[in-house]
Image (tube, coloured by chain):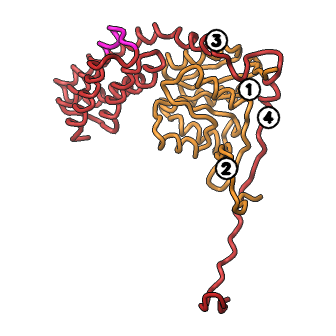
Amino acid sequence: MTHYDWGSGAIVTPEEPKKKKNVQIIPAQTDLKRRAVNFVKGFDINLSPEQLEELENVVQRSTETFVRDVGKELMDCRKIVIGALGDKSKRPEAVAACGDLAYSVKALGGTFQYPLMTQIAKSMESFVADRTTANEKQLLVSQLHIDSLYVILASRVTGFGTTVEQATVAALTKLAERYELPRE
Amino acid sequence: MNAKIDFSKISFLIVDGDKISAQVVYDTLAYLGASHIQRVKKPNDAFDVLRREQIDIVVCEWRLRGMDGLEFLDVMRNSTNSPNRFIPVIMLTAHSEMKYVTTARDLGITEFLAKPFNAKALYSRLVSVIARPRRFINTGTYFGPDRRRRQVQFDGPDRREL
């Protein structure tokens, strides 16, 4: 119902009272905490730098497997891409293979002290993302990414490399931007 | 005296199609003392394990064959066929952009871990899930752990009422 507001001198309509939202709050499940958190056995909640280092060493145990498996995947993918250059029907498969490889390397490179590989794989992943096929030049761009990844892995370039490696990453990203279209 | 976590009391399920990634998580959990760790590559196999065995924490990759990690999470949280709607899920993914984080959060993820990750990051997510459990919120559009994690001073009315 409207009324006269003496302060502003206007006829105002009061706002409808807001409906309360139906929200259910369920208390936290503390079963895991009760079972596992104690003061006697296990690992400190706040690990010391030494304990963290040991834990990191456990992660690094898989480095050799990473180098071996990714090396093989890079070679296999390169073969598929080269095969697709001369055969249009094989291109969707090549694009899918490049996408899988790029995601895998992007995800794991940095974990095993190969952040440069993660950078290149990121460029490759965005290049092949949402594509179902690629033209010849686009396949060549993918192949260049694969070759660069292989060189880094084979030469064991850990860390972010020197200015040369960083320039290579920048050049690959630029190349990917240049041949981005058409995106089919 | 420092509080400790006895990982041997907790069972884990790793859902990851990538052999190396799954192995890294497995090795880390095994080193921490976890004795019950299951590994599967596909979400459907994960559902089988979850229906068959007592699993406490799921560590799941976003990119999976068949059903992706988000669909898996959606079924876990919202389906009537879910084996356990409250199970903590740690999502591992190389999709670390903000849009992916918010999408996962709004589907009820417990913790998000961007790849490439290190041991410290994985450990902190495990501690958070085990030692700092969060309450669950059930609304018409969301079911999952409370997304309000920061304690911010607020003078207005509390609109989250029963």
Q: Which residues are magenta?
A: A150-158
Amino acid at dot 2: Val
Name the side, left or right, on which A118 lies relative to A26. Answer: left
Residue A30's disc is 4
Image coordinates of residue A1 in percent, x first then y, are: 67, 89
- The residue carrying pointer 4 sits among few (fewer than 14), some (14 to 19) or many (20 or more) residues within 10 Å by Cα, namely some
Which chain does orange denote in the image?
A: B
Query: Are discs 1 and 3 less than 8 Å apart at CB?
Result: no
A154 lies left or right of B108: left
Query: Could you tell me if the residues under marks 4 and 2 are in contact, i.e. CB atoms within 8 Å?
Result: no
Given contact means CB atoms under 8 Å apart, are the residues at marks 4 and 3 in contact? no
User: Circle 1 sits on which residue?
Assistant: B54
Q: Nearer the viewer, residue A169 or A141?
A: A169
Mark 4 → mark 3, Cα distance in angstroms? 30 Å
Circle 2 is placed at which residue position?
B152
Whether residue A75 is visible to the viewer of this picture, yes or no, is: no
Amino acid marked by disc 1 = Gln
Of helix, strand and loop, which one carries label 2? loop
Mark 2 or 1, nearer chain start: 1
Tags 2 and 1 on a common chain: yes
Tell me what hue chain A is rendered in.
red
Q: CA distance from mark 4 to mark 2?
A: 24 Å
Q: Please provide percent x and percent y for residue A70.
A: 39, 14
Question: Of the residues tagged 2 and 1, which is closer to the observer?
Answer: 2
Cα distance in 3D space between marks 4 and 1: 16 Å
**Discs 4 and 3 share one subunit:** yes
Location of residue B114 with respect to A65 vertically, above or below: below
Rendered-image quadrant of the C terminus of chain B: bottom right
Q: Are marks 2 and 3 in contact (CB under 8 Å)?
A: no
Tell which residue pokes out farthest to the front in this image.
A7
